[in-house]
Amino acid sequence: MMSATMRRIQLPFRRALSTAAAESSSSEKIVASVLFERLPVVVPKIDPVVYAFQEFSFRWQQQYRRRYPDEFLNKSNTRGKGDYQIEYTPAPRITEADKTNDRKSLNRALDRRLYLLLYGKAYEAPSDKPVWHFPEKVYHSEETLRKCAESALHSVLGDLSNTYFVGNAPMGHMTVTIGEDAQDLPSFKRFFFKSQVIAKDEFNVGKCKDFVWVTKDELLEYFPDQAEFLRKMIIS
């Protein structure tokens, strides 16, 4: 059982923590942003260096592989042969959306990950000026920060049945300092949550003036001031 002395020590400590949390929440806003991504739908091309190593490794193993009797190999070659025949035609890697650079389509850059960006009002935008940003929402009274992120994506898509949030913890965070154009807004912390597209190739994106689906390299062009941070946070 906890002694009376320990209870007297812990009580002021808990009060100090609650007071500090209240002061932090009142002085600094928290914004939940969603990195909504579509995973690759075709196998990415192998890097030439990786291909050369795999070729070398295969040839090296062939020199020391176990030799099987010829009668065993002959039986394995005849197994599975029948009257049926399967015709397979691989899907093209370059789509019409790739040729026209249609960034509103998910049917492009099939061997890369695509990320959703919105063009419209953002929390840090001065004078309601539209800017490119991720789906976001200011944290108020949600049960968890992930619930806030889910609400942000739901407000844009209208439905989360074809989405999957990866984990409960954010994948990264940053402290945003407002510039001279928006001096009335204090600095705030932005937490990024990852969500993925599940079995869908088109979304009705709303509550924005425009939107794009872009690769990582293209995404960095929209955020030149935050490019270094985003390059480290988005690993693949």
Image (cartoon, helix red, strand yellow):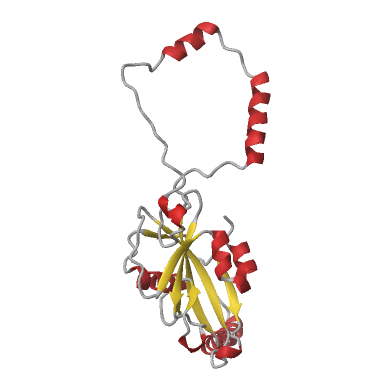
Count of numbered badges drawn on the protein: 0
On the question of residue 225 being in view, the answer is yes
Closer-to-camera residue (114/74): 114
- On the picture, is 40 further left or further right than 4? left
Please give the name of the residue rendered at 44% of the width and 80% of the height, measured from the top-left corner. 121
Q: Position of residue 50 (x, y in %)?
A: 64, 39
- On the picture, is 87 further left or further right than 33? left
Quadrant for the C terminus in the image: bottom right
On the question of residue 64 being in view, the answer is no
Closer-to-camera residue (66/88): 88
**Figure check: 83 above or below 155:** above
User: Which residue is most to the top?
Assistant: 71
Q: Position of residue 177 (x, y in %)?
A: 61, 83
User: Which residue is most to the bottom?
Assistant: 184
Q: Position of residue 220 (x, y in %)?
A: 58, 65
**Figure check: 115 above or below 125:** above
Quadrant for the N terminus in the image: bottom right
Q: Position of residue 43 (x, y in %)?
A: 49, 43
Please give the name of the residue rendered at 57% of the width and 67% of the height, measured from the top-left corner. 221
**Figure check: 14 above or below 71:** below
